[in-house]
Amino acid sequence: MKCSARAYAIQGLVKYHGLRNAKLRIPFHDSISVCMKSLDTVTTVETGDSLHRDRIRINGIVPTSGEEARARMVIDKLRELAGEKTRVRVESRNANVKGKGLGFSASGFAALGLAASKALGLSLEPRELSEVVRLGAGSAARSLVGGFSIWYANRKGRSYAEQLASASSIGLRTLIVPIPSSIKTDKAHADVLTSPFFRARLAYLRGVLQRMRRAIGRKDVSEICRLAEVDTLNLHAITMTGRLETILVSPLSVRIMDEVRRLREEEGVPVWYSLDTGPSVFVNTTPRAASKVARRIRTLAGNVLSSDPAGPAEIISRHLF
């Protein structure tokens, strides 16, 4: 059987960093994100007795041993749930955008999980499937359910995601500046636990998660974006102060952040920045102000994508093979 799915990468709004259980990818705290329509992953999964071994390709190439191991965790769990030992062929392609910190691991594993579950004959509820795709990448749980969503670290002993607001219900427009980097974020997730400020972040998160949920409930774009900008600085503070002293931002990241602040503070434009665990920048604004913001950001960066929020992962009819 062959099935294909599309999922969308996430922009962290209240970001997660650090894992309480690295094997099961269970974080220390809840996190909130929004999916980005311009950053999609399409994955096709085929099952069948004619396949002699599992075959996995990501963007046309064989994944690293680490990437393949993560994919197998998701596939093996789904095979276990289906009571199947059938082999699979997997082809996955991200949008042709090169940058670090764009959330493609989230969309990749969300699309893989949905396509593989259907190819194996499963009909899992989003909550249950989000717990499976989380094994490959934590943020995949939120990419699976789409829109503005929350990933619970521990809710009655379970760690899963649910949607807080649909993609179309909040008037957000994001300009995305992809910036490459060779830094491995898994190392950063482990290293933040050595920061002297990590416990302070956990205390801060209790309040900001409640404020972000209220802002999403009120559809308050300005407050959503402001809180995401503040959380960016908090996140990168613990990243830079771990034992490895990891600096994820680039000089271009900083120039964009400065320009966003100038636009807001000197010209009154409703615009804020957000960065996940990488140098790529999400510039958040309103649809009305987006054209002006895009023109200004393009004076600094040649590659700028415009994106609306995106919905949940979905089954599609177009296959990659």
Image (cartoon, rainbow, N blue to C red):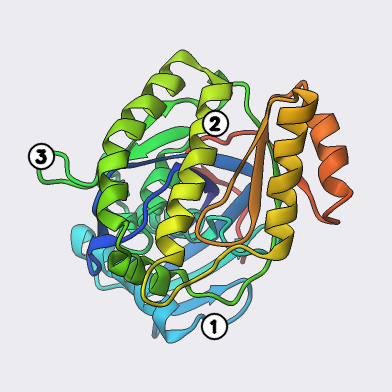
3 or 1: mark nearer the eye? 3
Q: Report the Cα–Cα distance between label 3 and label 1.
A: 38 Å
Q: Is residue 206 visible?
A: yes
Looking at numbered disc 1 in the image, what kind of residue is underneath it? Answer: Val
Q: Position of residue 304 (x, y in %)?
A: 79, 49
In which quadrant of the rendered image does the C terminus lie? bottom right
Q: Which residue is mark 3?
A: 156
Name the residue at 57% across, 22% down: 221
Residue in front for this viewpoint, 260 or 70:
260
Residue 174's place in the image compared with 238, above or below, is above
Instruction: Provide the secondary structure element on which disc 1 rests.
Output: loop
Instruction: Provide the secondary structure element on which disc 3 rests.
Output: loop
Looking at numbered disc 3 in the image, what kind of residue is underneath it? Answer: Lys
1 or 2: mark nearer the eye? 2
Left or right: 57 with respect to 301?
A: left
Q: Residues within 10 Å of mark 3 (few under 14, many from 20)?
A: few
Name the residue at 40% across, 81% down: 66
Q: Residues within 10 Å of mark 1 (few under 14, many from 20)?
A: few
Instruction: Provide the secondary structure element on which disc 2 rests.
Output: helix
Q: Report the Cα–Cα distance between label 1 and label 2.
A: 40 Å
Question: Is disc 3 in contact with disc 1, using a CB cutoff of under 8 Å?
Answer: no
Q: Position of residue 222 (x, y in %)?
A: 58, 23
Left or right: 29 with respect to 115?
A: left
In which quadrant of the rendered image does the N terminus lie? bottom left
Residue 88's place in the image compared with 198, above or below, is below
Q: Which residue is mark 2?
A: 226
- Upstream in sequence: badge 3 or badge 1: 1
Residue in front for this viewpoint, 204 or 271:
204
Looking at numbered disc 2 in the image, what kind of residue is underneath it? Answer: Arg
The total number of labels drawn is: 3
Q: Which residue is mark 1?
A: 62
Question: Is disc 3 in contact with disc 2, using a CB cutoff of under 8 Å?
Answer: no
